[in-house]
Amino acid sequence: MAFVPELLRFDSLPSTNLEAARRAGEGAPEGLCVVAREQTTGRGRLQRHWVSPKDAGLYFSIVLRPRFEQSAWSLLTLMAAVAVNDALREACALETDIKWPNDILANRKKLCGILGETVETSLGRAVVVGIGINLTKNSFSEELELVATSVETATGGRHELATILEALVAALRNHYETLKEPDGPERIVHEWCARSTYGEGKLVRVVESNGTLVGTTRGLELDGALRVETESGDLRIVRAGDVNLLRAC
Ligand code: BTN
């Protein structure tokens, strides 16, 4: 059965992911959504800080309690990226790209980041998926202007947070239902590839915890890992790391 979304709104939180995880620990149901006008210690991927000034971004987290095989859980953040891509198209007529694994880009600059975190709860392991969308250019510091953008800059106008939020929750619900199907992993990987220019034929540098790899992207594994063909013809499977474009092949 599809989750019934329940929305909790806050003026200020340390992190919507932390609040959603705390509530998941207390037994919050799947579909609980936490939104804050600002975050004081927003969390990013790879232990980074996510700058979250008041009313400059959409700071959102959702509690999921997947019951499908754990091997498909890594697809939850890719599924969320597909949902953000859809929501921005529907709510703002904005076409975005997805940089592996789940950065949303507009004009090659980052507009949204996604962070999935698992939580042990008395109802079993849950996943909190946190989504930060830059709404205005105040959402990131000046020194990031070369690599970051906002919905306002990319569309040339302001958009209601409520409209984006509504479209986002509907898209998450829709794509999460797809992921639960027996062929869900294939379908989500397919949807991701249809929305990303990074999946195939991009010359990239991948910075992993144990080194750097240069190669051409060759699609995704069924668990969302990125296939990269090195110059020597080896196929490497990347499960975590930062991907940067070198040039289009
Ligand atoms: C990234 O580094 O790209 C992921 C950033 C994720 C930021 C969002 S904002 C809402 C949610 N709460 C957090 O503390 N982080 C995520």
Image (spheres, rainbow, N blue to C red):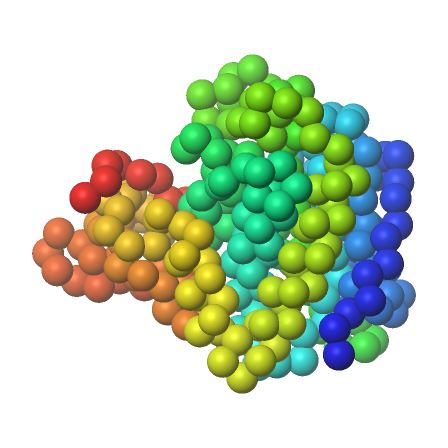
Measured as percent of width and height from the top left, residue 39 is found at: 77, 35
Residue 119 visible to an observer of this rendering: no
Residue drawn at 56 percent across, 61 percent down: 79
Residue drawn at 80 percent across, 54 percent down: 33
Left or right position of 204 against 80: left
Q: Quadrant of the C terminus?
A: top left
Q: Residue furthest bottom?
A: 182
Measured as percent of width and height from the top left, residue 164 is found at: 70, 42
Residue drawn at 62 percent across, 45 percent down: 90
Splitting the image into 4 quarters, where does residue 121 fall? bottom right
As drawn, 108 above or below 17: above
| Number of numbered discs on residues | 0
Measured as percent of width and height from the top left, residue 123 is found at: 81, 77
User: Which is nearer the eye, 23 or 152?
Assistant: 152
Residue drawn at 23 percent across, 44 percent down: 203
Residue 145 visible to an observer of this rendering: yes
Measured as percent of width and height from the top left, residue 77 is found at: 57, 58
Q: Residue furthest left?
A: 232
